């Protein structure tokens, strides 16, 4: 499994691609913050619509990042 992840984060030559690593860290940080928010705010409801809008904005930003690079 680690080989699959390493292959997904590498470019065509096999070197680690900083944009893919940054995108993975961004997604994991977003999900970690969402989970932490749900755990820490016990008396507030989890709003799936707000989560979806935030995740969509993040996905659009990452897609734009790869689009500007132009070599994916």
Image (tube, grey):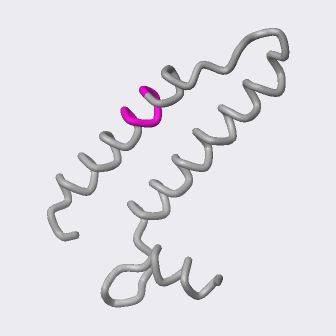
**Which residue sits at x=61%, y=49%?**
28
On screen, residue 58 versus residue 63, left or right, reads: right
| Residue 32, percent from left and from top | 69, 41
Residue 1's place in the image compared with 55, above or below, is below
Examine the image and state in which quarter residue 44 appears: top right
Examine the image and state in which quarter residue 38 appears: top right
**Which residue sits at x=54%, y=84%?**
4
| Residue 54, percent from left and from top | 46, 28
Quadrant containing the N terminus in the rendered view: bottom right
**Which residue sits at x=53%, y=48%?**
27
| Residue 11, percent from left and from top | 35, 80
Residue furthest out toward the top:
43
Quadrant containing the C terminus in the rendered view: bottom left
Tell me if residue 66 is in the magenta stretch.
no
On screen, residue 65 versus residue 2, left or right, reads: left
Q: Is the magenta stretch mostly helix, strand or loop?
A: helix
Examine the image and state in which quarter residue 39 appears: top right
| Residue 46, percent from left and from top | 67, 20
Residue 24's place in the image compared with 54, above or below, is below
**Which residue sits at x=42%, y=26%?**
53
Q: How many marks?
A: 0
Residue 8's place in the image compared with 28, above or below, is below
In the image, the segment drawn in magenta is 53-57
On screen, residue 45 versus residue 28, left or right, reads: right
On screen, residue 58 versus residue 34, left or right, reads: left
Residue 45's place in the image compared with 27, above or below, is above
Tell me if residue 55 is in the magenta stretch.
yes
């Amino acid at each position: 499994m680690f080989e699959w992840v390493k292959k997904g984060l590498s470019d065509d030559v096999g070197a680690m691609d900083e944009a893919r690593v940054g995108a993975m860290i961004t997604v994991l940080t977003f999900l970690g913050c969402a989970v932490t928010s749900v755990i820490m705010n016990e008396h507030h409801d989890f709003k799936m619509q707000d989560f979806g809008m935030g995740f969509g904005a993040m996905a659009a930003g990452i897609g734009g990042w790869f689009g500007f690079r132009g070599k994916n």
